[in-house]
Image (cartoon, rainbow, N blue to C red):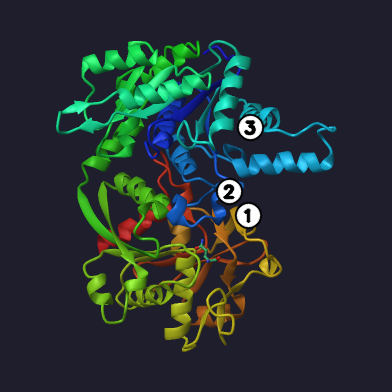
Amino acid sequence: MSKKNTKYIFVTGGVTSSLGKGIVSASLGLLLKSRGFNVTIQKLDPYINIDPGTLNPYEHGECYVTEDGAETDLDLGHYERYLDAPTSQNNNVTTGKIYQTVIEKERKGDFLGKTVQVIPHITNEIKRRIKMLSKQNYDIIITEIGGTVGDIESLPYIETVRQLKWELGEKNSMVIHLTLLPYLASSGELKTKPSQHSVRQLMESGIMADVLVCRTEHTIPKDQRAKLAQFCNVSLDNVIECKDLETIYEVPIYLQKQNFDDVVLKELDLKNDKEADLKDWKTFLKKFKNPKKSIEIALVGKYISLQDSYISIAEAFKHAGASLETEVKVRWVYSGDITADNIKETLNGVDGILIAPGFGDRGIEGKVLTAQYARENKVPMLGICLGMQIMTIEFARNVLGHSKANSMEFDTSTPDPVISIMEEQKNIVDKGGTMRLGAWKCSLKNASKLYDIYGAKNISERHRHRYEFNSDYLQEFEKNGFLATGTNPETGLVEALELPDHPFYVGVQYHPEYKSTVATPHPLFRAFIRACEKK
Ligand code: GLN
């Protein structure tokens, strides 16, 4: 492969939102990576929040956390899961971040008396953020532009793409436009008009799409394909079909069959005879689609009506499940509905329970009841972040007899704050980006389940929390059999607890789900699924 300058791929969306630009970008990234290119994917989000950390998951789904502690869009999770490579702060940029930087510069006087404007100051800052990634020696940078072409918010981004395309010169950048072909059942037709209009809208901003990726429920007939090519100004090979598939993990294979990667490489004048090696990916898919066993796990949380809120957990189950040839069915349970009277019925028949991460006191007591149910009935249980804190509260109340034990997040006057606010968090008032975030080291006790699971003493996992296990209670917990088997090597902070005399009762302050990928299923999820199978 002849190494040239970094090449840029811009992915835009037309007609409607939620077409799956993230999945298409991740799939393309995987195809190019499998052909030996060094690829990264970036998301530009046109909203004014600095990051999604302060957003309610109902608004924007899960907040994904990177190794370096950025709170980011959930699409970054897809990028990591497909590419099996970490992203960073620089992979997610929002309008809020862009404006913040420009305004800070203005206050410093960096613009030397000039009027600060959307063009060129905002567009230059967007450009700088896109190009910043090229310092890391990538062959190809895929930049996904959030939102839909035509949105007022997206305009500065679209204009930046136009400028960059021109500045970078022929064959150094390209635009992939993802669009929707609606199906009219009454006439049995796929319609191309909305796509034509959205391509035209792009053209009004001075951008020609190089490739069209069409989301569709049905195979695109030949004549419709030709029509799309002709009216949208792309060659026939560059009309790519992206049909609804059984799982998002089939998308790379589906796109490869249409030579999507070849089309893209040709547009970028990159040569490479290697075929994308998707052997491992296909093995994963095969196992995922043909499981030998099936288990059901209850995921107990408070954002149950939108499954995007826990997407990394759901995907981690798929990765680990497939590696064990086990189908993991998830029973989504809203903790606010759980009472002592209905818990047995609600959790009846599940092979394991996961208590989800979360913030705020809604649905907390239902989660405490769930922890008690799992502990007493020896149902395998994994508690993540808030989940671990709930397991702590439950143990304190029902085993140690501190009936009013609680987290200071929910009750500041509890006589037994078994979960307390972290020292460094006490004086923080701002909500955005101020939690304990990103990867932290954790050392595991030799004779523990977790040590066996990880097969290592020193691990590193990602975090997102303000509260912690209150170590004033550590001795009492351990004396009664709930052991802190993972701690931060520098501060002694408790990162993991487990009950040795239970088939699987593990709570972790960190988020293992952020590190699970198709290529590297997470050992903790694997171990949890194994324990559920035994039940
Ligand atoms: N609300 C808890 C805390 O801030 C747990 C956070 C989480 O589950 N991510 O510590």
**Camera-nearest residue between 427 and 239:** 239
Q: State whether label 2 is within 8 Å of ligand 1.
A: no
Give the structural element (helix, strand or loop) at label 2: loop
Q: Position of residue 490 (x, y in %)?
A: 67, 61
How far is the residue under mark 2 from the one under mark 1? 8 Å
Give the structural element (helix, strand or loop) at label 3: helix
Q: Quadrant of residue 212?
A: top left
Mark 1 or 3: in front is: 3
Relative horizontal placement of residue 513, taking residue 330 as reference (left or right):
right
Residue receiving disc 1: 433
- Mark earlier in primary sequence (3, 2): 2
- Mark earlier in primary sequence (2, 1): 2
Residue receiving disc 2: 51
Mark 1 near mark 3, Cβ–Cβ under 8 Å? Answer: no
Q: Position of residue 351 (x, y in %)?
A: 26, 64
Mark 2 near mark 1, Cβ–Cβ under 8 Å? Answer: yes
Callout 1 environment at 10 Å: few (<14), some (14 to 19), or many (20+)?
Answer: some
Callout 2 environment at 10 Å: few (<14), some (14 to 19), or many (20+)?
Answer: many
Q: Is residue 154 above or below residue 269?
A: below
- Mark earlier in primary sequence (1, 3): 3
Is residue 399 at all visible to an observer of this figure? no
Q: Residue at x 42, y 85 (%)?
A: 398
Image quadrant for the C terminus?
Answer: bottom left
Q: Residue at x 22, y 31 (%)?
A: 183
| Kind of residue indicated by mark 2 | Asp
Callout 3 environment at 10 Å: few (<14), some (14 to 19), or many (20+)?
Answer: many
How far is the residue under mark 3 from the one under mark 2? 15 Å
Residue receiving disc 3: 126
How far is the residue under mark 1 from the one under mark 3? 21 Å
Q: State whether label 3 is within 8 Å of ligand 1.
A: no
